Image (cartoon, rainbow, N blue to C red):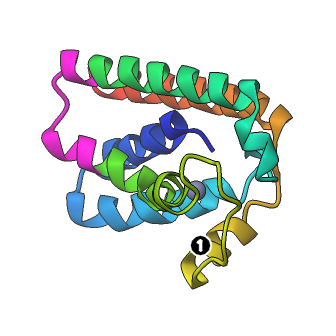
């Protein structure tokens, strides 16, 4: 799932609970729930070097930047940003693996640890067409958050 949607969900959990003690673990759990649903992504290692993967990653980072700007303009509480980060947190392991272990995708992935195996195994519905439900979900979550923080 995209950075933007994981982050939006963490912030959405913060909006709903308005309690950091409940929000942070719930945001972490939300990551795994979302990854188990149909979403955008590529299953195989070779596809991650395709132009479309890199283009989608670039778009995701730009949209995420716009989201952060929106949250800053609307002065949400500081811990909402932490909730968004926790919502994305498990995917930092993929970034670490891609940069450090796979040398920016030039080395085939090696054996994964228990957590990464679990994380990969729940993403059975990761497909290119998953961008469609992701756009719908992200738009809905953004509308919910923007309507709740004003
Ligand atoms: Zn994930």
Q: Residue furthest bottom?
A: 114
Direction from residue 135 to residue 82 in the image, left or right: left
Q: Position of residue 2 (x, y in %)?
A: 58, 39
Above/below status of 146 relative to 31? above
Q: Position of residue 1 (x, y in %)?
A: 63, 44
Q: Position of residue 111 (x, y in %)?
A: 67, 78
Q: Position of residue 104 (x, y in %)?
A: 55, 46
Confirm whether residue 81 shows in the render.
Answer: yes
Point 35% across, 45% down: residue: 84
Point 58% across, 57% down: residue: 102
Point 54% across, 53% down: residue: 103
Direction from residue 70 to residue 43 in the image, left or right: right
The answer to which of 28 and 51 lies nearer the viewer is 51
Magenta stretch holds residue 6 = no
Above/below status of 128 relative to 69? below
- Residue bearing the label numbered 1: 116
Quadrant containing the C terminus is top left
Above/below status of 13 relative to 21? above
Point 63% across, 69% down: residue: 119
Dot 1: element = helix
Which quadrant of the render holds ligand 1?
bottom right
Q: Which residues are magenta?
A: 71-82
Density class for disc 1 (Cα within 10 Å; few <14, some 14-19, many ≥20) is: some
Confirm whether residue 41 shows in the render.
Answer: no
The answer to which of 35 and 58 lies nearer the viewer is 58
Magenta stretch holds residue 79 = yes
């Amino acid at each position: 799932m995209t950075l933007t949607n994981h982050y939006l969900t963490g912030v959405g959990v913060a909006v709903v609970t308005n309690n950091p003690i409940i929000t942070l673990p719930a945001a972490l759990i939300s990551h795994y729930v979302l990854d188990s649903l149909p979403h955008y992504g590529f299953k195989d290692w070779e596809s991650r070097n395709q132009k479309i993967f890199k283009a989608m990653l670039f778009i995701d980072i730009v949209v995420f930047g716009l989201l952060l700007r929106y949250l800053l303009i609307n002065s949400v509480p500081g811990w909402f940003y932490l909730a968004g980060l926790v919502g994305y947190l498990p995917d930092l392991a993929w970034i670490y693996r891609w940069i450090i272990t796979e040398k920016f995708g030039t080395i085939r992935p090696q054996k994964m640890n228990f957590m990464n195996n679990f994380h990969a195994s729940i993403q059975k519905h990761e497909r290119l067409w998953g961008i469609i439900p992701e756009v719908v979900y992200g738009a809905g979550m953004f509308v919910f958050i923007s309507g709740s923080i004003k």
